[in-house]
Amino acid sequence: MGKEIINRVALSKLMVVDLEDYYPEGERIIFDIKDWLYEGFVLREKDFRQLVTDYNWSKHENQFVALTCSTDAIIPAWAYMLLTIELQPYARKVNVGDLESLETSIYQDIINGLDVEPYHDKPLIIKGCAHKPVPSNAYIMLTSKLKPVAKSIMYGEACSSVPLFKRK
């Protein structure tokens, strides 16, 4: 008879941190203001304000919204601020940029609020291979948050991890 196979990973104190576990469900949309500009390039304040007043903002209930302008127009900061004021009662998150910057902003809030105490003096694996759109910056932010408390940090899966940090 051969030796009994022992799962040393299951018996170890190794903790897996999976950013997908923190992924908030909800529709992500791009709100492009190009059609609200004169000829797609000029923001006319009076016309813009009228469009803001007439728009049905409630259709963005519980959405994550990335504000953008897909033309080369120069958009003053107040325009995005005005849109944010109208979206705030409905949208879960508003950001200026593309969907990746929106996702990064969402994860920044999540990671900033993460309780790191359970990871204190533990060897950690930050799981890779996400099936949800976890931005690369989320891994960077998580690593920065966990490094001061972790005993060690690896990336990947328990069977094929890449060592990144070990406290000396």
Image: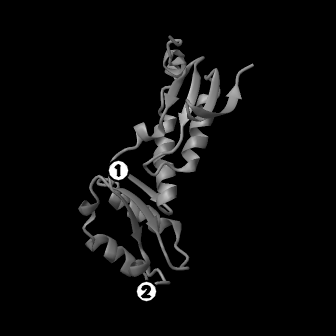
Mark 1 and mark 2 lie on one chain; the one further toward the N terminus is 2
* Residue 132 pos. (x, y %): 43, 49
Q: Is residue 136 above or below residue 161?
A: below
Name the image quarter holding residue 37.
bottom left
Q: Is residue 166 above or below residue 35?
A: above
Q: Residues within 10 Å of mark 1 (few under 14, many from 20)?
A: some
- Location of the C terminus (image quadrant): top right
Q: Is residue 126 above or below residue 131?
A: above
Left or right: 112 as drawn, with respect to 33: right
Q: Residue at x 39, y 80 (%)?
A: 35
Left or right: 60 as drawn, with respect to 9: left
Q: CA distance from mark 1 to mark 2?
A: 29 Å
Is 83 or 59 nearer to us in this picture?
59
Is 41 or 1 nearer to us in this picture?
1
* Residue 1 pos. (x, y %): 50, 10
Residue that sits furthest to the front in the current view: 1
Mark 1 vs mark 2: in front: 1
Task: Report whether residue 159 is seen.
Answer: yes
Q: Amino acid at mark 1?
A: Arg
How is the rendered protein coloured?
one colour
Left or right: 133 as drawn, with respect to 64: right
Q: Residue at x 46, y 60 (%)?
A: 99
Q: Residues within 10 Å of mark 2 (few under 14, many from 20)?
A: few
* Residue 144 pos. (x, y %): 63, 35
Q: Is residue 66 above or below residue 157?
A: below
The mark found on residue 92 in the picture is: 1
Is 129 or 22 nearer to us in this picture?
129
Residue designated by label 2? 38
Tell me the SS state at disc 1: loop
Q: Amino acid at mark 2?
A: Tyr
* Residue 154 pos. (x, y %): 62, 31
